[in-house]
Image (cartoon, rainbow, N blue to C red):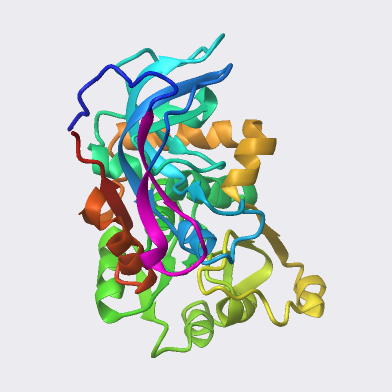
C-alpha cells in the first residue's frame, strides 16, 4: 500500500493547479491552469488529490460530444483518490488523513484539491495502492450494478462481456467470476488484449476485429445464446449483441465507447424472445438515486478487501503528461485504467 502524505490544505480563496480546457478539441487543448481551491459545502469533504484516472467520458467531454456536460472552461476528471484534509459544515465522513477514492459526477477531479459529497468518497481498502484506487470506483461500481442490480446474474449463468480488456470490461470479468457466473465469454480488440482478458478470468475470448462474435457465441451455446450480455461499446456491437441473448435473457448497456448509438434496436426481437434491455449511468445514480449505488459500494469494497479482484492499471502518467494520457486512451492502447499522478511542489 502506498499513501499520500497529509498536508495542510491551502486556504480557501487561494489557487491550485487544475486540468481544464477553454475550447473543445483534442488532447492539445488541455492546460494546467491556476484555479481557486474549492470550499467544501455542507456534507462535503475536501481531499488533496494524489492521482486521478482518465476515462471515456473525459475524452467525450473534451471533444464536446458528451450530453449534459458544462460549457468550457472547466476542470475535467471524474475518478480520483486522495487524502481527506477538511470537511464542510455538518459532514459525517472519514476523518482527516484517511485515504479515499470515488467517482465525482460533477467533475473537477483532475486538480490538486477536490471538494465532493462525503457519500461519493469511500475509504481505500489496504489491498489497493494509490494508482489502483484512483481508477477503481467507476469501473467496479458500474460493473457491479450492471451485473447484480440490472443484470440479475444468477450463479452458474453464462455471460458475454464486451471490451473485456478495458477498465469496465476487466472489472466485469473479475466480478462475474467472483459472483459465481458460469462461462464468461468475452470480446477484445486485439490478440494481446484477448490474452489479458483470459488472465482476468474469461473462459472464451474472441478478437472481434477478426471474428463474428455473435456467430461464435451462438456456436458456443448450441445456438441458444447467453442469459446476460454486458455491453459498453454501442453501435454495431450493441446491435449484434441482441443476437447473443438467450430467450428470457438480459442485455445491460452502460455506454458507447465507439461514439455511436444503436442503429436498429429491433423491437420484435425483444418481445418474441422475451429479452430485457436496460441501461444506466453511474453518475446519474450517484446524483439522483444514491440508494441504488450503496449495495454496490458494499459488495465492491468487500471484494477488494478479500483480494478477490484487483484493479488493472495499464499505464501511469505524471501530471505534466496528462494530455498524453488522454491520447493513450483514445488510441485504445489501454488495458485497464489510465492514471495520472500529481507531483508535489
In the rendered view, does 312 fall on the left or right side of 276? left
- The question of residue 19 being in magenta is answered with yes
Q: Is residue 197 left or right of residue 157?
A: left
Image position, residue 293 (x, y; %): 58, 36
Give the quarter of the image for residue 85. top left
100 within the magenta span: no
In this orientation, which residue lies closer to the viewer: 142 or 58? 58
Estimate the x, y position of residue 297 in percent, counting from the top left.
Answer: 49, 34
Q: Quadrant of residue 167?
A: bottom left
Query: Which span is picked out in magenta?
Result: 15-33
Residue 234, horizontal then vertical, whole percent? 58, 72
Q: Is residue 118 above or below residue 254?
A: above
State the residue lying farthest toward the top.
90
Of residue 267 and residue 258, the one placed in the foreground of this image is 258
Residue drawn at x 75%, y 73% as measured from the top left: 273
Nearer to the camera, 25 or 315: 25
| Residue located at (55% from left, 33% from top) | 295
Can residue 12 be seen at all in this image of the molecule? yes
Looking at the rendering, in which quadrant would you find the N terminus?
top left
Q: Is residue 71 above or below residue 149?
A: below
Residue shown at 44%/47% (left/top)? 77
Q: Quadrant of residue 262?
A: bottom right
Looking at the picture, does residue 334 appear above or below residue 301? Answer: below
| Left or right: residue 136 compared with residue 260 | left
Visible residue check, residue 292: no
Q: Quadrant of the C terminus?
A: top left
Q: Nearer the viewer, residue 86 or 117?
A: 86
Residue 265, given in percent of the width and then of the height, sits at: 73, 77
Is 9 situated left or right of 20 in this image?
left
Rendered position, 226 above or below 313: below
Number of numbered callouts drawn? 0
Amino acid at each position: 500500500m502506498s499513501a499520500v502524505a497529509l498536508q495542510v490544505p491551502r486556504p480557501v480563496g487561494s489557487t491550485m493547479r487544475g486540468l481544464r480546457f477553454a475550447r473543445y478539441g483534442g488532447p492539445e487543448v488541455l492546460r494546467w491552469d491556476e484555479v481557486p481551491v474549492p470550499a467544501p459545502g455542507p456534507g462535503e469533504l475536501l481531499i488533496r488529490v494524489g492521482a486521478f484516472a482518465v476515462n471515456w467520458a473525459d475524452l467525450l467531454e473534451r471533444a464536446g460530444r458528451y450530453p449534459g456536460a458544462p460549457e468550457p472552461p472547466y476542470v475535467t476528471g471524474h475518478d480520483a483518490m486522495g487524502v481527506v484534509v477538511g470537511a464542510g459544515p455538518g459532514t459525517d465522513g472519514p476523518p482527516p488523513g484517511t485515504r479515499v477514492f470515488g467517482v465525482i459526477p460533477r467533475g473537477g477531479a483532475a486538480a490538486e484539491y477536490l471538494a465532493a459529497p462525503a457519500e461519493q468518497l469511500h475509504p481505500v481498502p489496504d489491498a489497493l495502492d494509490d494508482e489502483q484506487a484512483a481508477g477503481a470506483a467507476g469501473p467496479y461500481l458500474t460493473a457491479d450494478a450492471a451485473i447484480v442490480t440490472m443484470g440479475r446474474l444468477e450463479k452458474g449463468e453464462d455471460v458475454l462481456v464486451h471490451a473485456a480488456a478495458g477498465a469496465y470490461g476487466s472489472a466485469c470479468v473479475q466480478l462475474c467470476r467472483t459472483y459465481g457466473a458460469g462461462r464468461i465469454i468475452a470480446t477484445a480488440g486485439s490478440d494481446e488484449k484477448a490474452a489479458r482478458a483470459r488472465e482476468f478470468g474469461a473462459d472464451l475470448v474472441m478478437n472481434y476485429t477478426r471474428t463474428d462474435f455473435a456467430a461464435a457465441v451462438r456456436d458456443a451455446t448450441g445456438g441458444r445464446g447467453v442469459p446476460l450480455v454486458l455491453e459498453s461499446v454501442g453501435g454495431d456491437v450493441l446491435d449484434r449483441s441482441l443476437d447473443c441473448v438467450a430467450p428470457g435473457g438480459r442485455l445491460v448497456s452502460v455506454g458507447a465507447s465507439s461514439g455511436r448509438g444503436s442503429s436498429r434496436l429491433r423491437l420484435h426481437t425483444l418481445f418474441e424472445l422475451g429479452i430485457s434491455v436496460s441501461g444506466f449511468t453511474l453518475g446519474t445514480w450517484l446524483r439522483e438515486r444514491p440508494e441504488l449505488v450503496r449495495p454496490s459500494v458494499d459488495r465492491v469494497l468487500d471484494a477488494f478487501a478479500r483480494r478477490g479482484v484487483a484493479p488493472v492499471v495499464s499505464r501511469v502518467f505524471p501530471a505534466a503528461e496528462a494530455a498524453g494520457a488522454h491520447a493513450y486512451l483514445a488510441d485504445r492502447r489501454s488495458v485497464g485504467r489510465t492514471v495520472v499522478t500529481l507531483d508535489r511542489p
